[in-house]
Image (tube, coloured by chain):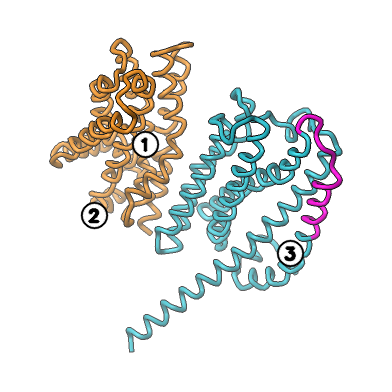
Chain colours: A orange, B cyan
Amino acid sequence: MTAALALLRRDIALAFREGGAIGVALGFYLVVIAIAPFGLGPDMNLLARVAPGLLWIALLLAALLSADRIFHNDYEDGSLDVLTMGPLPLAAVAASKSLAHWITTCVPLALLAPVLGLLLNFPIDTIPILVLAMMVGTPAVSFIAGIGASLTLGLRRSGLLLALLVLPLYVPVLIFGVSTISAAVTGPGSPWPPFLMLCAISLASMVLAPLASAAALRTSFR
Amino acid sequence: MTFSLTNLANPTRFLNFTAAVIPWLAGLTAILLGIGLYQAFFVAPADYQQGETVRIMYIHVPAAWVGMGCYAVIAIAALGTLIWRHPLADVAAKAAAPIGATFTFVILVTGSLWGKPMWGTYWVWDARLTSLLVLFLLYLGLIALWQSIEDPGRAGRAAAILALVGAVNLPIIKFSVDWWNTLHQPASVFRADGPTIDPSLLTPLFVMGVAFLALFVLLHLIAMRAEILRRRVRVLQQTQVAQAAAS
């Protein structure tokens, strides 16, 4: 347990020191939301209707583009080899790194989302549900991105391949994430049933995804 | 000529076995397809509501059975690669992926063409169609992953993991018409209370189903042969390069 926490602390510290890694993801999120009205037209009613979907999709893309950071740096300088020989099972290593990705990338993105929602005329009184849904849904995003990162370790054009592999797996997260927020904004119905499904998906992926990531990491080593 | 899974694990024996079997299988497939298509277009009655357009069903539904069954084959082959290290399991998976993608594409296109006269739209984002589109994307992801990794062994294991992760989509597709309110009709063949289709329509459907299954097995075996031979060529090329470098 202490080894896993030490690894977590190390990855968070490295992410903060990497010089702009988190800032770039936030900037990407901002830019994508900012150009959306140029493509969709400035009609605020339309933007308010598409705001939940746009906020979620841009968050998924921003998280995916920083996903190869999960294993890549350690793979390059050999630390991943040391970790596989250490006291932690490889699944715990994968879980720790995915959790670090969640804390350093997805949580800042989720906290930025309300601000960007203002650009899209998102109603202010539903901002708490927006942040809550994103906080609860993004662990699934990070852990499934961990599977993609471990499958595409060391490959050329791994960023695009990672997105191609992982985005179909994000469809349930996207469906329930958007329906939580839409139910809260316009109704009808309560946002809590899709919210609970979002919790379930996140919890299931936190348990199962590290197993798949560890198996994929082992294939990269043999 | 025994053909247990362990006997055929030897690639040479597999090549010999399939070389003998494929011509017969091709003939059987042609006969079954001939009978099935004749029954579908000339023998089976038109539907009382849909008229002649119901005949798209005889392509659409068997393609759906094969498209989803192909993914199940890939998932089982993935288990064979990861758990039993069967030598031909990753060959089977790699060969099946483009075939499955094509059958899934056929499902989507024939479904679209059927949907326009029946529902008034080529596409709708209901649960069945969406999960089948996700299946198509999963097939594309598998093909992309196979093509991106040079070493066939590593590619096989990585694709096996991806195939198993995506296998959760299969029960979602099957039960999507039960779990959600969908425009696509609910299950009418494989249901707990038995089929709800009249036998005059059901029999040609089953004949076409068997014909498509034979077609899938035929295409799969041909693709597996091609993949084995491709790997042999690759090894020969590598040996050639190594010898040229050594001399």
Question: Does the CB distance between marks 1 and 2 fall below 8 Å?
Answer: no
- Picture coordinates of residue A89, whole percent (x, y): 35, 43
Residue extending farthest bottom: B247
Residue A57 has which mark? none
Q: Is residue B105 above or below residue B170?
A: below
User: Are the residues under marks 1 and 2 on the same chain?
Assistant: yes
Residue B26 has which mark? 3
Magenta stretch: helix, strand or loop mostly: helix
Q: Amino acid at mark 3?
A: Ala
Circle nearer the viewer, 3 or 2? 3
Q: Which residues are magenta?
A: B31-50
Locate the C terminus of chain B and report the quarter of the image it occupies.
bottom left
Q: Is residue B49 above or below residue A21?
A: above
The residue singled out by tag 2 in the image is A76
User: Are the residues under marks 3 and 1 on the same chain?
Assistant: no
Residue situated in front as seen by the camera: B245 or B99: B99
Locate the N terminus of chain B and report the quarter of the image it occupies.
bottom right
Does A153 sit left or right of B54 as displayed? left
Which chain contains the residue that carries disc 3?
B
Q: Is residue A6 visible?
A: no
The residue singled out by tag 1 in the image is A143
